[in-house]
């Protein structure tokens, strides 16, 4: 579905690339984890795929469903079915959850909004008329925000650090919910993360390290390389069998 081909990104005013000759693919109906430490270029790459002007590739191509979209605008990419959920999305404080979700698609009927709330495991009866404000927990807020993105019916859903700020006890629930969304919507998901727990639902992965690809393939293979580079073998051992040298 998505092909990133030898993409290099050099921000305006800089001489050094923040993303350097990066290539990977996201396959239909798969969850692909783009993993790496903070500052490795993950979010910059996500913004380039979405079409933000400041992150336009200086080299390389971005192909979506067989079409070169490298020079497409954000609007053109959105119409093709690409949606980006920001790590810190725009806040609409004080409006109802119903209206918050419908911002992404004002033609959505009540039953559609209810189905989306059920999809993210929130009871429509309890949450439909609640306000988007400080009374929502971090986990509840993430679920509402995810529903507001899914309502756009994306073909490719880019999630930039969606697990940021979540309590560790809700990680598993959140990842399971992403898997349900993938199966229900038939969308592909590009998951931008630095957490090894995401491997529980990722089908494949790419490791980005200082702007360069260091590993591609199954998530276990990618995490093995990540643990080597980051010196996190002890922590990663509980998620993956690291027997290679």
Image: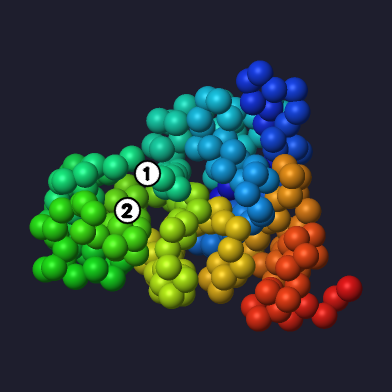
Give whichever of 192, 179 is nearer the camera.
192
Residue projecting furthest to the front: 134
* Residues at circles 1 and 2 in contact by the CB criterion of under 8 Å: yes
On screen, residue 155 above or below 124: above
Q: Which residue is mark 1?
A: 89
The image quadrant that residue 54 belongs to is: top right
- Along the line of sight, the residue nearer the viewer: 133 or 126: 133
Residue, x 24% and y 63% (percent of image)?
117
Q: Which mark is residue 130?
A: none
- Answer with left or right where residue 119 lies relative to residue 199: left
Q: Residues within 10 Å of mark 1 (few under 14, many from 20)?
A: few
The CA distance from mark 1 to mark 2 is 8 Å
Element marked by disc 2 = helix
Q: Position of residue 5 (x, y in %)?
A: 70, 40
* Spot occupied by residue 179 in the image (x, y as percentages of width and height): 45, 69
Q: Residue 108: tell me if it is visible.
A: no
**At which x and y percent is residue 214?**
78, 53
- Specify the label residue 145 is tagged with: 2
Q: Quadrant of residue 84?
A: top left
Instruction: Please say which color scheme the image uses.
Output: rainbow
Residue depicted at 53% across the width and 25% down the height:
53
Q: Is residue 178 left or right of residue 25?
A: left
Query: In the displayed image of the protein, which residue is found farthest to the right?
Result: 245
The residue sitting at 75% across, 72% down in the picture is: 233
Sequence-first tag of 1 and 2: 1
Could you tell me which quadrant the C terminus lies in?
bottom right
The residue carrying pointer 2 sits among few (fewer than 14), some (14 to 19) or many (20 or more) residues within 10 Å by Cα, namely many
Question: Where does residue 113 sit, x and y in percent of width and height?
Answer: 19, 57
């Amino acid at each position: 579905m998505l092909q990133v081909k030898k993409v290099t990104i050099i921000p305006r005013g800089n001489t050094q690339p923040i993303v350097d000759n990066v290539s990977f693919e996201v396959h239909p109906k798969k969850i692909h984890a783009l993993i790496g430490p903070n500052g490795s270029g993950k979010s910059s790459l996500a913004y380039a795929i979405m079409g933000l002007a400041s992150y336009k590739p200086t080299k390389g191509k971005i192909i979506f469903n067989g079409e070169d979209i490298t020079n497409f605008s954000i609007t053109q990419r959105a119409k093709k079915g690409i949606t980006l959920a920001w790590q810190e999305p725009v806040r609409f404080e004080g409006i109802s959850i119903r209206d918050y979700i419908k911002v992404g698609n004002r033609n959505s009927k009540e039953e559609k909004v209810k189905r989306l709330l059920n999809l993210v495991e929130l009871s429509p009866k309890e949450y439909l008329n609640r306000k988007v404000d400080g009374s929502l927990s971090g986990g509840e807020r993430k679920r509402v925000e995810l529903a507001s993105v899914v309502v756009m019916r994306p073909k490719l859903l880019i999630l930039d650090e969606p697990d940021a700020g979540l309590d560790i006890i809700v990680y598993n629930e959140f990842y399971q919910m992403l898997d349900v969304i993938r199966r229900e919507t038939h969308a592909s998901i590009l998951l931008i993360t630095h957490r090894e727990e995401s491997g529980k639902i990722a089908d494949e992965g790419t490791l980005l390290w200082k702007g360069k690809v260091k590993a591609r393939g199954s998530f276990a293979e990618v995490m093995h390389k990540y643990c080597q580079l980051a010196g996190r073998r002890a922590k990663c051992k509980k998620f993956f069998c690291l027997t290679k040298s």
